[in-house]
Amino acid sequence: MNARQTPWGHAPDADTIEAIARAAIARLPDAFRAHLDGVVLQVEEFADDATLDEMGIDDPIALSGLYTGRPISVKSVDDSGTMPDVIHLYRRPLLDEWAEGEVTLEALVTHVTIHEIGHHFGLSDDDMHALEDGEA
């Protein structure tokens, strides 16, 4: 089976994408997982128009994931009453990117999930790559 074939026989649905992301989170070191309890994971078809406009993105296919919230490095007790931090995964952009490349859907969803988790921790791109590669 090549990277674009699926064992599902159809385009993976939101539940499948979420299961892949949750499996990626479960593989993180305990020290990271302990700080993700309040973070919500949402799988949506696309980012909404307001989000795309705010980010200056014209093509909704261009955004496959997004972290909304405050990185834990800048949180304080004064943050009570705020909305929860959210990792958004956008199904259609993920599927389009997967269909164009040589990477498995699992690898792509894992990569995007880890990248968005990295924003929660205020990590650099290098730190995110090390975490994804299991070097953290």
Image (cartoon, rainbow, N blue to C red):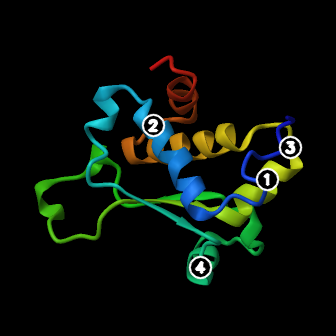
Callout 2: SS: loop
Give the residue at x 74% y 45%: 7
The residue that label 1 is drawn on is: 97
83 and 102: which is toward the camera: 102
Give the residue at x 75% y 38%: 104
Task: From the image, state whether disc 4 or disc 2 is nearer to you.
Answer: 4
129 and 126: which is toward the camera: 129
| Whether label 1 touches label 2, CB < 8 Å | no
The amino acid beneath tag 4 is Asp
Which residue occupies the extreme top position in the image?
135
The residue that label 3 is drawn on is: 101
| Whether label 3 touches label 2, CB < 8 Å | no
The amino acid beneath tag 1 is Glu
Task: From the image, state whether disc 3 or disc 4 is nearer to you.
Answer: 3
Label 3 vs 4, first from the N-terminus: 4
Q: Is residue 97 above or below residue 118?
A: below
The residue that label 4 is drawn on is: 48
Callout 1: SS: helix
| Whether label 1 touches label 3, CB < 8 Å | yes
The amino acid beneath tag 3 is Gly
The residue that label 2 is drawn on is: 123
Query: In the image, which disc is placed on residue 21?
Result: none
Q: Quadrant of the C terminus?
A: top left
Q: How many labels does the image show?
A: 4
Give the residue at x 31% y 45%: 36
Q: What crowding class fits label 4: few (fewer than 14 Cα within 10 Å), some (14-19), or many (20 or more)? A: few
Q: Give the Cα separation between the discs numbered 3 and 4.
A: 25 Å
Label 1 vs 4, first from the N-terminus: 4
Callout 3: SS: loop
Quarter of the image holding residue 27? top left
Quarter of the image holding residue 107? top right
